[in-house]
Amino acid sequence: MQTSAAVEVAGLVKRYGDKTAVDGLDLSVLRGTVTAFLGPNGAGKTTTIETCEGYRSPDAGTVRVLGLDPVADGAALRPRIGVMLQSGGIYPTARAEETLRHMATLHAHPLDVPSLVERLGLGSCGRTPYRRLSGGQQQRLALALALVGRPELVFLDEPTAGLDPQARHATWDLVRELRTDGVTVLLTTHAMDEAEELSDDVAIVDGGRVIAQGTPEELCKGGAENTLRFGGRPGLDLGSLLKALPAETVAVELSPGSYRLTGTVDPQLLATVTSWCAQNGVLPDRISVERRTLEDVFLELTGRELRS
Ligand code: ATP
């Protein structure tokens, strides 16, 4: 019987000399889902993924991919997975389409190369040597190479970094189609909107460990923090408003007449704000409650900028 996990990592440790890059990492990726693997630079994402791909051996812990050991069972595993690397692995002088055709011949049931070329907008550069392709074209070719063998599981390392908006959306559509076709996708990205848009599950890694995992909705509703914004006349007495609100509420006039409250924004707080406005002759010209975004959660958990 197949297990429901496509990737199962338990207690993974990986060191480079004195540097512990991955420090007891646990990760489970369910079959047929898209999982985003997020983390600040140097958190250990690439090392973990390269271990799952069989390019690195664990110093401790276990890794199972499609039920197999990626190193010991590498020959059996490789035809079943697709790997999109951030860079490298392609001969600089090889032409884009012939590289793709060659990769297709290595697989028993490859995708149709011309339609993949068309989908990824590689038609106009099919005869261009790899080193002459633009960064975005190289990126799209790397994605095509990962997909041409109809993998059961694909690892995508920052698949849309550096792509123009059109290519970015084409890539998102492809990832959605992969999920519809039952393919498991594990992707790393620094783009939080991409993770929210595409993923069923998000794992946030920091310091070589997964520090949070769940659906984007679960992660975003984890805390009571929300934001309320409203517009009114400039220079309102926020001190008197705060007296009516729970002690942890923070109020800021972001720009003249534009106010932001953060804290436990619940129906009671909204009622208190509107009643304070009525008592003070303030007609808010707009009022909105915004939930936390994945980016807010990420920054709270890791305490760092996205690209440190
Ligand atoms: P990024 O978002 O920047 O791609 P990452 O989360 O993928 O980062 P890794 O590339 O896995 O992080 O790196 C984790 C840590 O291990 C970093 O401190 C990095 O400098 C170090 N590291 C990675 N590869 C090597 C290597 N071959 N030799 C020595 N140290 C390495």
Image: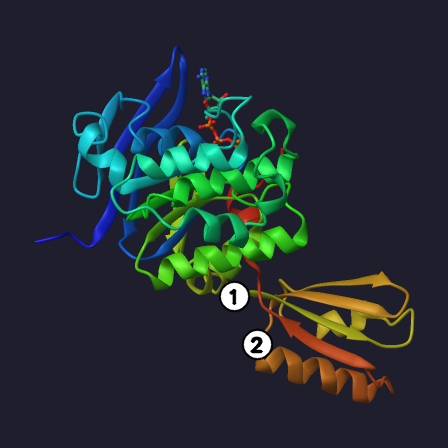
Q: How is the rendered protein coloured?
A: rainbow
How far apart in space, not on screen, are marks 1 and 2 (Cα)?
9 Å
Q: Quadrant of residue 146?
A: top left
Q: In this rendering, is residue 193 above or below 251?
A: above
Q: Quadrant of residue 270?
A: bottom right
Q: Helix or strand or loop: what does disc 2 sit on?
A: loop
Mark 1 touches mark 2? (CB < 8 Å): yes
Q: Which mark is residue 266?
A: 2
Q: Helix or strand or loop: what does disc 1 sit on?
A: loop
Depth check: give the residue in front, 148 or 50.
Answer: 148
Q: Residue furthest top?
A: 17
Q: Is residue 231 left or right of residue 125?
A: right
Structural crowding at the residue carrying mark 2, measured as other residues with C-alpha within 10 Å and reported as few (<14), some (14–19) or many (≥20): some
In the rendered image, is residue 200 in sight?
A: no
Reading the image, the residue beneath label 1 is 224
Q: Which mark is residue 183?
A: none
Q: Residue at x 74, y 79 (%)?
A: 287
Q: Residue at x 17, y 30 (%)?
A: 73
Q: In this rendering, is residue 91 above or below 12?
A: above
Depth check: give the residue in front, 195 or 43.
Answer: 195
Q: Residue at x 30, y 34 (%)?
A: 106
Q: Report the number of discs.
A: 2
* Residue 260: % across, % down: 74, 66
* Residue 85: % across, % down: 46, 33
Which amino acid does the dot numbered 1 rest on?
Answer: Ala
Q: Earlier in the sequence, mark 1 or mark 2?
A: 1
* Residue 163: % across, % down: 63, 45
Q: In this rendering, is residue 183 above or below 154?
A: below
Q: Is residue 186 left or right of residue 232?
A: left
Depth check: give the residue in front, 93 or 242.
Answer: 93
